[in-house]
Amino acid sequence: MKILLYSISFAPDPTGVGKYSGEMARWLVEQGHEVRVICAPPYYPNWQLAEGYEAPVYRREDWRGVDVWRAPLWVPRELSGRSRLLHLLSFAVTSFPVALAQLFWKPDVVVCVAPALVNAPAAWMVARLSGAKAWLHVQDFEVDVAFSLGLLTGRWARSLVCRMESLLMRRFDVVSSISSPMLESLRAKKVAPGKIRSFVNWVDISQVQVLQRASAYREELGLPDTMRVVLFSGTLGGKQGLDVIPRAARLLVERKDILFVIGGEGVVKHDLQQACEGLPNVRFMPLQPAERLGEWLGLADVHLLTQSPEAADLVLPSKLTGMLASGRPVIATCRQGTELARVVADCGVVTPPEDARALAAAICGLLDSPEDSRALGGQGRRYAEENLSKEGVLRQFEEDCADLLPELTVSRARH
């Protein structure tokens, strides 16, 4: 198959933003498919172009057999609803001629990853003009999240934008998403049930194993054997509800056996560091190398997965997959009844969003009950193996693509 992947973020680094696009593209090439990717230069989570990508503004790269076409975009210095929208629109405009150039390649399937939904019209047009099937994958309901977080406002604006979103989605041959509530949201947006597919975030369970020894990071950080680590690892962004961490750390400052480790980069990192100033039980770490992901996640005695209350119903964080695979219990700050709460309830503890006292109590409860923590971590690992295996998820995606192309299915059957 010839598969065109249209995604604003594409990261060969499996710890970075866009990692799923990168892993999927590489896996498909390994299965013998031709894969092209249209994407932006690396810029997230620091909101600045990665070194070496300032020029040329358009470039074509080969990465492990994946044909990568990068188009420029405007990266704002200060984030607001308007600047984010202009940022996304800039990539939609600059990548449009790159998308049209793929007509000569004649892809079989065009997969558009949202965010950013503004790329969907070009992806759909290329698919229709080239005779390909059009697949829209919804990683985040960015329109709903934008209005919920107040990045976009206005009742009439929301009504108009949601109508346009629904109309656009219904034109695709397949629309997929990552959780049961998000699939229900697709139905609520009037996407035909026969077009809806589940396409969950996965984890490479061979890369993230349950450590049966102390993580190498403990020695590097100079941690005594008695020190327990509460780890948050991921993008430090606005919708993560991260402000609850310094408040919980302040409540536990007398517990000399508990250390909060916050690893990652993002736009709120400076504010978070300021909020943690003077707290001896909090340590910040930069984004860690991909090849050390298993050791890094194995540093945790407990994983933290904080979420903004406005976003928790709409987003199932991709970082959860690695946490579960590491075999460590998870504390999620989210509303009961959400998909995140349902998953974490069997492998950790759920506390209300922004409730620092409840979070502090949950941390103490898990760390002071090691047998319960091990049991919950083991259940998380089993869930990852049974539901989130990279090989199983991508194999199903490959089969779903093939089912869209009966001529390829027939040809394969003949051989």
Image: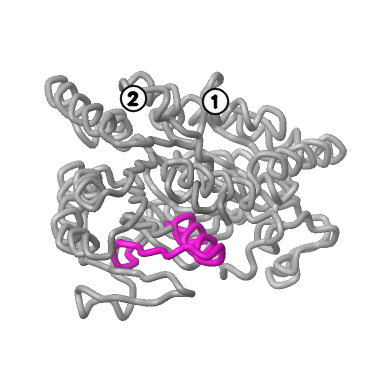
Residue 318, image x, y percentages = 52, 46
Of circles 2 and 1, the one toward us is: 2
Q: Nearer the viewer, residue 332 or 96?
A: 96
Please give the label number shown on residue 25: none
Residue for point 77% across, 37% down: 379
Q: Nearer the viewer, residue 384 or 277?
A: 384
Q: Quadrant of the N terminus?
A: bottom left
- Magenta-tinted stretch: 15-43
Q: Is residue 274 left or right of residue 356?
A: left
**Residue 124: quadrant of the picture:** top left
Residue for point 33% across, 54% down: 7
Q: Quadrant of the C terminus?
A: bottom right
The reply to whether the magenta stretch includes residue 281 is no
Three-letter amino acid code of the residue under disc 1? Pro
The reply to whether the magenta stretch includes residue 20 is yes
User: SS class of the residue under badge 1?
Assistant: loop
Q: Is residue 184 left or right of residue 153?
A: right
Residue 227, image x, y percentages = 77, 55
Position above or below: 337 against 355: above
**Residue 102: quadrant of the picture:** bottom left
Residue for point 62% across, 70% down: 291
Label 2 sits on residue? 191
Q: Residue furthest right?
A: 371
Three-letter amino acid code of the residue under disc 2? Val
- Mark 2, Cα crowd under 10 Å, few <14 / some 14-19 / many 20+, is many
Residue for point 13% across, 56% down: 93
Please give the label number shown on residue 352: 1
Residue 182, image x, y percentages = 44, 28
Q: Nearer the viewer, residue 152 or 31?
A: 31
Q: Earlier in the sequence, mark 2 or mark 1?
A: 2
Position above or below: 265 against 394: below
Does any portion of residue 14 appear in the rendered image? yes
